[in-house]
Amino acid sequence: MKKEFILFGASGDLARQKLYPALFHLFGMGESMRYVGFARSELTAVQFYDIVRASVLATDVEVSPAKLDAFVSAWTYVSGTYDASGIGQIAQVEGDADSIERFFYLSIPSGVGLIMSVVRGLKEHNLINARSAIVLEKPFGLDYASAKNINSFLLEHFTEEQIFRIDHYLAKDLVQDLLALRFANPIFEPVWNGKYIDRMTIEIKETEGIRNRGQYYDQSGAMRDMIQNHALQLLAFSVMNQPKNISAESIHREKIAVLEKIRLWDDGKNAISIGQYVGYRNEPYVAPLSQTETKASLTVCIDTPAWRTVPITITSGKKMDKKTTDITIYFKKRPHSMWDESGCSLDQNVIRVNVAPDNDIRLTLNSEFDLQKKCAFPTELRFGFRDNAFILNEPYENALRDLFAKDQSIFINSKEIALSWKFIDNVLERIALLRAEILETY
Ligand code: BG6
């Protein structure tokens, strides 16, 4: 079966920074196919090849020149508009249309209109068949209503199994390692609930501002840009019950069960905070009096017997003190223990998964016994994946590899999107009238 990867947005940032390097690595591992780059920019073949070559070399300098040449020359560039007339030009470079397994990757400015226009173009030119897959980048809509619209439109042309919605946080190695940590170690299973867990935090902090994305970001804010998707996915992944098996279907089912039960902590009292970094309003394309949040924090709980007593605080922000993504689980201290009488103060047991940049898992224990003071003292066990020479893949490489294998386990399905938006719509509605009052400057 001939395979073909058709990339819409082939001259854009995501393609340059992430997709070409990831595709090149997979190509090096034998995943080869015909590649078509499509974008509005009028580029000659040579100009386009230079883009692909430079983007691979920017991430990997030790590239075999012969392999890079082979990869670059597997591409055809087509320039056109994102509609039936533009897409007609792809159809012209096609051979035997029916026998090709096509992957349509939409790395284009989000917007229901543009997605629809591309899909209609593909349909009109008979490029979609039962083996096709379509890949969509976030955001999937701006709220529940628009996400529902996109989903129902897509489902008129593709089945759910053919739609791959990327959340690159789910494709990060350390996030997937949670599956092993949680479900391959029976010592953790009995304690992963509110009887033993005191609280949890999920923090996604970035040091950069919004760069040149003001047009998109000012309409979106941290709540829609990061919390609705990445943070809620990390949350669902961290607290879901054990899936029946490692199939996409089972994993999605368990994440959905979490997202269905997500609620604001304590009925929402003091559960939401938002902030905006100093200087945000001077960023290009940002409204001078913008009240868009560049930082958001929510405390939630999962309304099930196992979890409802555990406050889970999710925070994400730009221009923060460091770039880090951490999932931290704080276990309860025992109410009474033999150490009380000696006046020893024990630490909470804590598991912290640093998704990036350290790629490590730390476990705080009280495992040192001081013979003189007769007290237990905290120690930390740390396992660094990179330090131990584990190969860590780029999230886009993981996502594309699974896409080519048609495995949706690290992608998200329409129900997850709908539930996340319902929750976030509700949060945004609650703060709509208070925004000016509660928006802190940091
Ligand atoms: C994107 C957001 O989805 O994720 C960006 O739109 C954000 O605003 C980015 O900067 C962060 O990704 P990472 O992998 O660099 O932490």
Image: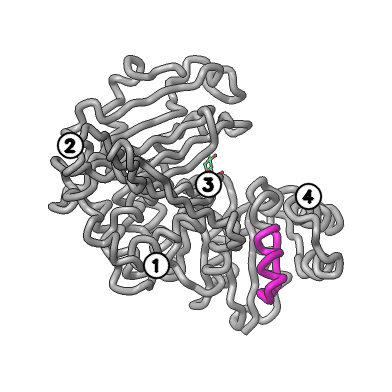
Q: Earlier in the sequence, mark 3 or mark 2?
A: 2
- The residue indicated by pointer 2 is 340
In the rendered image, the vertical position of residue 341 relative to residue 147, given as above or below: above
- Give residue 67's position: percent from left, percent from top: 81, 69
Residue 251 position within the rendered picture, expressed as x and y whole percent measured from the top left:
34, 65
Tell me the mark number nearer the camera, choosing from 1 and 2: 2
In front: label 1 or label 3:
3
Dot 1 or dot 4: first in sequence order is: 4
Q: Is residue 312 visible?
A: no
**Amino acid type, label 1:** Glu
Q: CA distance from mark 3 to mark 4?
A: 37 Å
Alpha-carbon distance for marks 2 and 4?
A: 74 Å
Q: Residue at x 31, y 45 (%)?
A: 349
User: From the Cβ of disc 3, is ligand 1 less than 8 Å away?
Assistant: yes
Give the mark, 2 or 4, whose residue is nearer the N terminus: 4
Q: Amino acid at mark 2?
A: Asp
Side of 258 where 105 appears, left or right: right
Q: Which residue is mark 1?
A: 160
Label 3 and label 2: CA atoms lie apart by 37 Å
Tell me, yes or no, whether the two marked residues, 1 and 4, touch with CB atoms within 8 Å. Answer: no
Which colour scheme appears in the figure?
Answer: one colour
Label 2 sits on a secondary structure element that is helix
Q: Nearer the viewer, residue 200 or 291?
A: 200
Residue tagged 4: 42
Q: Residue at x 35, y 55 (%)?
A: 237
Ligand 1 is within 8 Å of the C-beta of the residue at disc 1: no
Give the Cα distance between marks 1 and 3.
31 Å
Residue 213, given in percent of the width and then of the height, sits at: 59, 34
For marks 3 and 4 on the same chain, the one whose residue lies earlier in the sequence: 4
Mark 3 is on which residue type? Ala
Sort mark 3 into few (<14), some (14-19) or many (20+) by Cα contacts within 10 Å: some
The residue at the point 50 percent across, 45 percent down is 111
